[in-house]
Amino acid sequence: MRYLKKSLVGKVPYHSKKISDGIILNANESAFETPKKIIKLIKDELDNIDLRRYPDTDNTLVRNELAKVYNLDINNLTIGVGSDQLLDCVFRSLIDNEYILSCNPTFSMYKEYASYTNGKFIDIDFLPGFIFDLESIIKNIDKFKPKLVIICSPNNPTGSVIERSELELIINKTDGVVLLDEAYSEFYKSNYDLGIKYENVIVLKTFSKAYALAGIRVGYAIAAEDIINTINICRPPYNVSTISNIIAAIAIKNRYLYRDNIAKIIKLKDELYDNLCILGLNPIRSYSNFIFVKLNDVIYKHLLEKKIYIRRLNYNGEFWHRINTGTAEENKILVQTIREVL
Ligand code: PMP
């Protein structure tokens, strides 16, 4: 990569092997397929689609539906190609060599996007049991005065959550912007209204997890109009395809179709937690659709051999694993397969 700019030397392009065979529990996707009724509604809409034209660059269709659901003005919303694109826009529109404070471990892309704009990262470790260390967060906000504080709740990969009162304390303490990443909030609870209550808060959400629509790449941000305009400065024209706009609008309009699956996913995740405890492993209590657990090499390699894919992460020199819940059948096979090598 001889033309790569100096500040990015040493980086490698993002890659995630496309897996289509086996039990796939490594990307926090929905355990269940997109509801059949949603697929039917999509097919009906496709009959009338006009793909000759560019999409609506304002993504009005989805914003209108979201505005109704959340009782917001559409100017409090912007839509991205996944919440990933909005993260990139947040970093590019806010950060120039400034401090960003977040917790460790958390979603790895924050650091990637920060590096493109020379952001300086302050990592706050969790307390034992991966509990948010509010005291340390506040102390370091005072010390570094970060331009951006990122709180992911439920946190990827630990599943930890932060309470609303703690969030409000952080928001009131910082002169910068607080980004609350709620990619998994449908599995616990949402504080989306903080994006409206405060001038300096961005709440980020996605259709990739609870809505079983990772394939359409749509995410959204809720914030004060001034912050939405700021993010939009760096949002590319016509960013979300016409097809994705239509599908996301259908999903949000028919969100009641997801209620049962979300309840099932929470139950399956709790059962998986119990079963991992019974096996003598020490999983972390999670409020999302995945579980964080330390496993030895033998178990990890055996799962791979059996085509059971989980996410391995190096945290403070040790290998931890993030396993998203599958269906009841998939979880049963997972637990049986681990038991074979205990
Ligand atoms: N935030 C968090 C915490 C995530 O885990 C993910 C996906 N893994 C994203 C944002 C990005 O999701 P998407 O781009 O699919 O909306």
Image (cartoon, grey):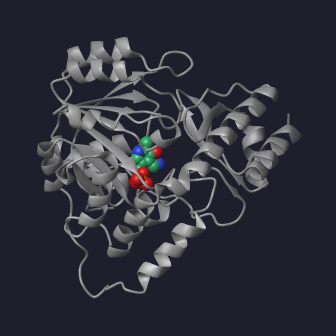
- Residue 207 place in picture, x, y as percent: 43, 55
* The C terminus, quarter of image: top right
Query: In this orientation, which residue lies closer to the viewer: 77 or 6?
Result: 77
Query: In this orientation, which residue lies closer to the viewer: 198 or 315?
Result: 198
- Residue 65 place in picture, x, y as percent: 32, 59
Say whether residue 133 is left or right of residue 173: right
Residue 164, compared with residue 50, is above or below; it is above
Say whether residue 127 is left or right of residue 82: right
Q: Quadrant of residue 19?
A: bottom right
- Looking at the image, which residue sits at the far right? 340
Say whether residue 129 is left or right of residue 199: right
Residue 176, compared with residue 48, is above or below; it is above
Residue at 37% x, 50% y: name it. Answer: 11
Residue at 21% x, 18% y: name it. Answer: 173
* The N terminus, quarter of image: bottom left
Q: Is residue 324 in sight in this rendering? A: no
Residue at 56% x, 61% y: name it. Answer: 17
